[in-house]
Amino acid sequence: MDRLKILVVDDESRMRKLVKDFLVKSDYEVIEAEDGAKAVELFFAQKDIRLVILDVMMPKMDGWEVCREIRSYSKVPIIMLTAKSDERDELQGFGLGVDEYIGKPFSPKILVARVEAILRRTGNMQAEEIIAAGGIELNKSAHMVKIDGRVIELSYKEFELLAFFMENRGIALSREKILNHVWNYDYFGDARTIDTHVKKLRSKMGDKGELIKTIWGMGYKLEAET
């Protein structure tokens, strides 16, 4: 069985090594980032990270910024580490969708126990995040799409667009509804941007792109068997 992958983000190399050593002993795969910008880059490149351990105070991008960026696209569990014990920081963390908040210094064994508890708790949720139909498998937690078992690379908006189609397969969706859901209500661009993204999405999906049907004068519909 593949080991679960955890991203550890801290600008202190000794801290990263300490956390990594304990996680590896517990049979997790660990990747490291020394600053916030690198963390975001790795998170979206790796696709299958199951949990993020994130320090608050870091160069380039702090933990709050990294958390906001990840939360824009993923519900992956996040544990925040901080040297502060300010209640306002803790409340800010939970407001951003942080799952656990651990103050430094901490026991590495306790951290591993928290990791295991969160992964147990979110295991069922993550299983439910996989949508499959017509040979397409979309994993919302990992932000990954497979077609007939082969991973395809999609942009963020292409991924969200396909997810919306799959969640509403068999239903005719107007361009306005797609725009409101995928681009949100604060988007004031031309609805033709949807047509452009659908064209790119179909191209990347190969033969499966034909499952996205055009509803002339209205929008689109995904026709795929579950």
Image (tube, rainbow, N blue to C red):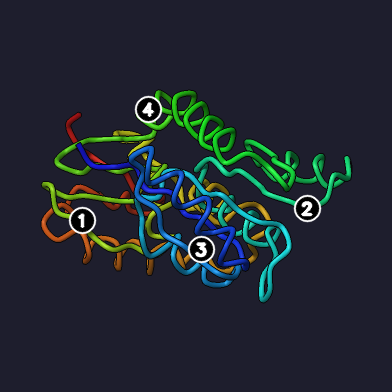
- Disc 1 marks a residue whose amino acid type is Val
Q: Residues within 10 Å of mark 2 (few under 14, many from 20)?
A: few
Query: Could you tell me how far apart the alpha carbons at marks 4 and 2 are, in whole angstroms?
Result: 35 Å
> Quadrant location of the C terminus?
top left
Q: Which residue is mark 2?
A: 83
**Residue 26 visible in the picture:** yes
Q: What amino acid does circle 4 point to? A: Glu
Mark 1 crowd level (few <14, some 14–19, many ≥20, 10 Å Cα): few
Tag 3 near tag 4, CB within 8 Å: no
User: Residue 222: x, y in percent?
Assistant: 28, 43
Between marks 1 and 3, how big is the CA–CA gap? 29 Å
**Residue 104 drawn at (x, y percent):** 73, 48
Residue type at mark 3: give it. Ala
Residue under numbered circle 4: 128
First in residue order: circle 2 vs circle 1 = 2
Q: Earlier in the sequence, mark 1 or mark 3?
A: 1
The tag earlier along the polypeptide, 4 or 2, is 2
Q: Residues within 10 Å of mark 4 (few under 14, many from 20)?
A: few
Instruction: Please give the label number shown on residue 191.
Output: 3
Give me the disc on residue 151. Answer: 1
Image side of residue 45 versus residue 73, left or right:
left
| Image quarter in which the N terminus is found | top left
Label 1: which secondary element: strand
